[in-house]
Image: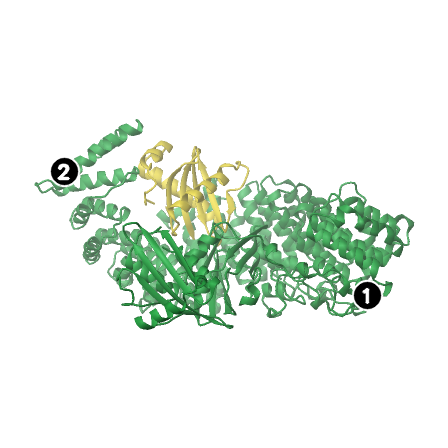
Amino acid sequence: MIKFFLMVNKQGQTRLSKYYEHVDINKRTILETEVIKSCLSRSSEQCSFVEYKDFKLIYRQYAALFIVVGVNDTENEMAIYEFIHNFVEVLDEYFSRVTFWLILYCERGKNTSWG
Amino acid sequence: MATAGPCNTIGKSKEAEIKRINKELANIRSKFKGDKALDGYSKKKYVCKLLFIFLLGHDIDFGHMEAVNLLSSNKYTEKQIGYLFISVLVNSNSELIRLINNAIKNDLASRNPTFMCLALHCIANVGSREMGEAFAADIPRILVAGDSMDSVKQSAALCLLRLYKASPDLVPMGEWTARVVHLLNDQHMGVVTAAVSLITCLCKKNPDDFKTCISLAVSRLSRIVSSASTDLQDYTYYFVPAPWLSVKLLRLLQCYPPPEDAAVKGRLVECLETVLNKAQEPPKSKKVQHSNAKNAILFETISLIIHYDSEPNLLVRACNQLGQFLQHRETNLRYLALESMCTLASSEFSHEAVKTHIDTVINALKTERDVSVRQRAADLLYAMCDRSNAKQIVSEMLRYLETADYAIREEIVLKVAILAEKYAVDYSWYVDTILNLIRIAGDYVSEEVWYRVLQIVTNRDDVQGYAAKTVFEALQAPACHENMVKVGGYILGEFGNLIAGDPRSSPPVQFSLLHSKFHLCSVATRALLLSTYIKFINLFPETKATIQGVLRAGSQLRNADVELQQRAVEYLTLSSVASTDVLATVLEEMPPFPERESSILAKLKRKKGPGAASALDDGRRDASSNDINGGVEPTPSTVSTPSPSADLLGLRAAPPPAAPQAPAGAGNLLVDVSSDGPVAQPGLGPTPEEAFLSELEPPAPESPMALLADPAPAADPGPEDFGSPIPEADELLNKFVCKNNGVLFENQLLQIGVKSEFRQNLGRMYLFYGNKTSVQFQSFTPTVVHPGDLQTQLAVQTKRVAAQVDGGAQVQQVLNIECLRDFLTPPLLSVRFRYGGAPQSLTLKLPVTINKFFQPTEMAAQDFFQRWKQLSLPQQEAQKIFKATHPMDAEVTKAKLLGFGSALLDNVDPNPENFVGAGIIQTKALQVGCLLRLEPNAQAQMYRLTLRTSKESVSRHLCELLAQQF
């Protein structure tokens, strides 16, 4: 199952986060920093799945924006990988041309539970 | 909508934004407070602004009531903003919750699908227990009601799933469960998708209740798989029909064994074959989205095939399909193929098929640019290894080790060590492999690995000569790893005689070779080498003079390290006073180690390496290998130690002699590993090093060895071995003087909780050790230490705890305490464990103070004064005047004094502000009567505390303990 969903920019700042399991606020910051670090440091030749502690990160990059999904080991990596793209397409369809700036400015607070 | 206000400032300075927002907040506040009733539109507008301001990161502390009002609006936009605000800014105000719940209830009953969905989304988004309690019973009804709209059913299913995950106990199972399964047949694909998610979660707990979902899921899957690429319209993704639903259905089927009904099974097999066939067809689109979606289904199909593990034909086809992916240009596919194949390798039907890809996998290990892919390749090689390809795989892994990423070296080392042992045809190959491991990646060779090679060499006499020759050669390298010195020292000390005939490895040569490494080694290795030297004196009498010279050198005899110094002194004395016979008996060759599961395998399993267990499971593939590889058989001819070494262990072993042996071989892996030595030491059995050294300990008091230096300091770890308590230990102890339960200690790794009860001179204490990390603690050893005279004053019996504490887990330890006589210092609790390979240790003061054995005594004023007078000698009284460090509250003081253990006597002291107490300290040897008086002075914020007991030390000690509490 999906544990969390993150949108992060290239500077490592969280633009949107949604957790599907309770995680303390201060632990989220640490978790997000580590998660982002492990995704940002990867090159395009490397695969999109990263093992992180006891779960897996599946990420995709759209220009300066990273979308990272944390799942447990019973999840189908490829399905989630493509789900991220589907999600982006839905955003694009709904808001017509989603750009990085749109997400940046509309989602400045981290308190959102949108998603 | 008019949210433009605060929006305008974005991008300008922070100050400008705050100023603008404060202005806006003031405006909204005044609107809400104004006399004029706001219309729905304005209310919505302002609530929406508040929400936006909150999302910008500012605190919002009003507007909840207006948002709740919006819930009862009949306009969608107003209701929606109301729900949005409530979902984001949940408030625990109970009056508000009541109103919110009421509004939700109305909407759920409204039969307006849009309103029902808004209400369901709000319940799911908040997901609190209170919401669950209020609505968990209604939602299943809505979910299965015949007249619910599709969108409502979809939301209801997901809302129920959310509530079930948060508090499973609140969701009642009932007749609706049978009907929920039929949602798999629903016309609407969204409903089916939501229902599959719900059923997959529910069926894990009650598989039988949902068994009927199998045939429904199969027929649904079959309809999707066989549909044309345009049949499902909205649910077709780049020409792939309902990919995510297919994946979910395949995953649901993995909760169950293969269908029993032949027709259902036939239909399912047909589906699986169709998916495999489609993978071979030319793609309907060149877009990567198309192939990704298709492959997602394919991988899930393969998972189901592996899960069933019963269709050889499908398994082999799956393997071939994955084989194609191994060389695909997409890294993601190569990664997933390696991962899936790893599980295929453990199936008897596909193991051979997996093996045909060995060259590709080896190539992946060498050429992949991504460490996670290489790691998967290493896992797969490990999983596909058997007798036929072991030599090739081990040598490839060894080669890879030279350039492997640091992060995975240790795991590779363990895997190589296991494979080498498991599939060794001849043991010289095994010895070579392990020595190569040490040479290539010495730093990553853990103790388990080199202990293991020593155990095997010791137990198998056919390899001892070869091992001695090989280590001798390996030691000649100018720079060799310290682990090599350890193995070399041990093996030459035991079996150096087997190669002494060759003049190139004559005893003096062997000795000088070892000794040339001595000065560069750590204390532990030097200690081991000293033991090798004394063994040399027995093996090769001609080296005696040289070795005695070395032992006698100031650098040994006066070494700053106690262990080294003691060994030098003892060995020197032993070599000079003992006769040759005695020497030969004491320094006899090591007896074989008891048969046990490989400690390395246990370690790898602890590391949870994927496929770790599967490949090494003895059994179907390798039943025949047990004769040489299934474990090391003891060879009886070498058993010749004078007394069972069981009594001798303990040079370092912490457990007290009286400690009960851990239950042996209960089938539990962890228990096995830690208990199958003669004397179980938590974490490790007798390590060769310890067994080796302990053999040199005096076997029994009447033996000739008795004249040696007193071995006590080494055999019985005194408190100094455990380090002094942490600086805050006293403060932590203080917290427990007046209470028995609580958290004794906490840091990032570990939490220690205490629960204790005392009666008369006896006490029982439960210590709870909680692992706060997600990583397992190893060699977890909590020990109670009695410094100084405490042993004669307090008896503490401990129960052993498991040597491994899983991440997030808690273990409990029970302590039985008996107070023998009055005591002043508390016992120490020393906790040691390994966390991520690094040793951790911690010493605390155990919260056992003399006042715990207080028995309260009630007495009349007259009796009190009479006894008070009897205890009037100056040394019987202890008094302290001190400043209050806490607020002076009579009730709190009373509670503390009761917690301290004495009875509180009312109407004794003429001044009602003062406290008077009495009690008896119960110990096994004697009882000490105590009287106390506490006089608070509120003006001066001071206390005067007076204690009178029949024993001077007790008076002073109690006075000190109690004075720190106020």
- Chain letter for the green part: B
Whether residue B110 is visible, yes or no, is no
Q: Quadrant of the C terminus of chain A?
A: top left
In the image, B752: left or right of B386? left
Eyeballing the image, is A1 above or below B700?
Answer: above
From the top left corner, tell me how far across and down residue B120 is, in percent.
Answer: 27, 54
Kind of residue indicated by mark 2? Ser
Nearest the viewer among B105 and A19 is: A19
In the rendered structure, the residue with mark 1 lies on which chain? B
Q: Secondary structure at mark 2?
A: helix
Total numbered circles = 2
- Chain letter for the yellow part: A
Whether residue B659 is visible, yes or no, is yes
Would you name the residue on which mark 1 appears?
B585
Q: Secondary structure at mark 1?
A: helix
Eyeballing the image, is B908 above or below B46?
Answer: below
From the top left corner, tell me how far across and down residue B222 is, in percent.
Answer: 44, 58
Q: Residue at x 24, y 45 (%)?
A: B85
Would you name the residue on which mark 2 appears?
B30
Q: Residue at x 20, y 44 (%)?
A: B62
Determine the CA span between mark 1 and mark 2.
97 Å
In the image, A102: left or right of B43? right
Nearest the viewer among B151 and B562 is: B562
Q: Residue at x 38, y 40 (%)?
A: A88
From the top left corner, tell me how far across and down residue B621 is, in percent.
Answer: 66, 63
N-terminal of the pair, mark 1 or mark 2, is: 2
In the image, B43: left or right of B440? left
Kind of residue indicated by mark 1? Thr
* Direction left: furthest residue: B35
